[in-house]
Amino acid sequence: MNTIRVGIVGLGRLGKVHAKNLAFAVPGAQLTAACSIVPAELDFAKNELGITNTFSEFGDMLNSDIDAVAIVTTSGLHCGQIAQALDAGKHVFCEKPLGVNVEECKLAEKAVEKHPDKVFFLGFMRRFDPSYAYAMEKIKAGAIGKPYMVKATGIDPEALVQGAIKFAPTSGGIFIDMAIHDIDLMRWFLGEDPVEVYAAGATFKHPEFKDAKDDETGVAMYKCASGAIGFVHVGRTAAHGYHVETEVVGTEGTLRISPIPEKNLTMIYDTNGARYECVGGFPERFAQAYQLEMKEFIDCIIEGRKPNVTVYDGTKSTQIAFATTQSYKDSKPLNINY
């Protein structure tokens, strides 16, 4: 099997990124079907991607001539669509989060375990970003000794804050909405799961977040059984653009990934001084990572192997995010039970 016929469900902002990659940038992939309940998204598939097989019902797309499906729908649909696609005999790529609660994640685990011959791939794309992947290579090579602390920052741009305000009442809270990738990186770099969390939040600029019982900024501290520590800082009001930064501290050195969220290597000299422009959002910052993770999904199918990112990674990250949210709500440290 040298060409994998893929159908995609969900063609919103991120769905379009995955669809374009599958259609034009991933060797071995052929995007042959698209599904959406939004007519304009199906028009995009037809007019921009050249897809003739479009569907408004997910089950109908699964009955079409495809080998795999990419699920990029709203979070609450993920687990049901994962099980439905696997039962239909399709390999599955699913965007994060795995599910909107731990119970759903456990159901997804059972669905994946039921079909061991199928590839299931969860979209933690930062693991495939060249800078993060290189940092992990250095850690495995012992370049910084034993990693014992991860400090992760992820702040959306102020320019997009109105969208975040609109989404806040149904987002699940800032940690569930924004911290999943940072939590996954913390687990990945430290090689273990935290057992305790203390989280807090703050709002100083947009009281609308407080009205939604949320905050514009959240900070969490994690402690692992070994004594290793994690710090996660997420927010929605970066004045300069989309800011993602990670630091891994080890016994013999430190790694810093993206300390300045540079748009490119061009420096601008003008009346504002000497400066770099910053990236404006996650599709721009992680464009290569999205392409590389989808390539890995297709390669796993062609080569008959399983990806390193598993359904259990999705469950663990969800459990940690919900424990973080509960600590935030209770304003006290909380043990994390798995």
Image (tube, grey):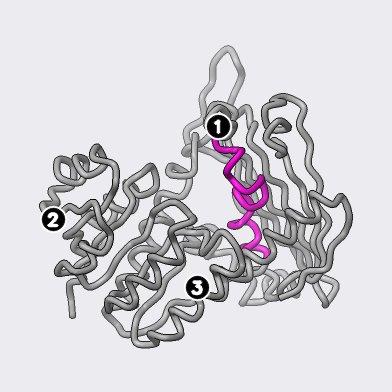
Q: Nearer the viewer, mark 1 or mark 3?
A: 1
Which percent across, then down, holds residue 133? 52, 65
From where the camera sits, is residue 71 visible? yes
Q: Amino acid at mark 3?
A: Val
Name the residue furthest right. Answer: 332
Task: Decide which of tag 1 and tag 3 comes sooner along the chain.
Answer: 1
With 172 as the anchor, is 283 left or right in this view? left
- Which residues make up the magenta segment? 167-186
Q: Is residue 149 above or below residue 112?
A: above
Q: CA distance from mark 2 to mark 1?
A: 33 Å
Q: CA distance from mark 1 to mark 3?
A: 32 Å
What residue would you read off at disc 1?
166
Which percent across, then down, holds residue 129? 48, 58
Q: Mark 1 packing: few (<14 Cα in 10 Å), some, or many (20+)? A: few
Which quadrant of the view contains residue 30? bottom left
Which percent across, then down, holds residue 23? 21, 55
Residue 53 image label: 2
Query: Does the magenta portion include 171?
Result: yes
Q: Amino acid at mark 1?
A: Lys
Task: Decide which of tag 2 and tag 3 comes sooner along the chain.
Answer: 2
Q: Nearer the viewer, mark 2 or mark 3?
A: 2
Which percent across, then down, holds residue 225? 82, 76
Helix, strand or loop at mark 2 = strand
Q: Residue at x 10, y 52 (%)?
A: 52
Q: Amino acid at mark 2?
A: Asn
From where the camera sits, is residue 130 visible? no
The chief SS type of the magenta part is: helix
Query: Does the magenta portion include 94?
Result: no
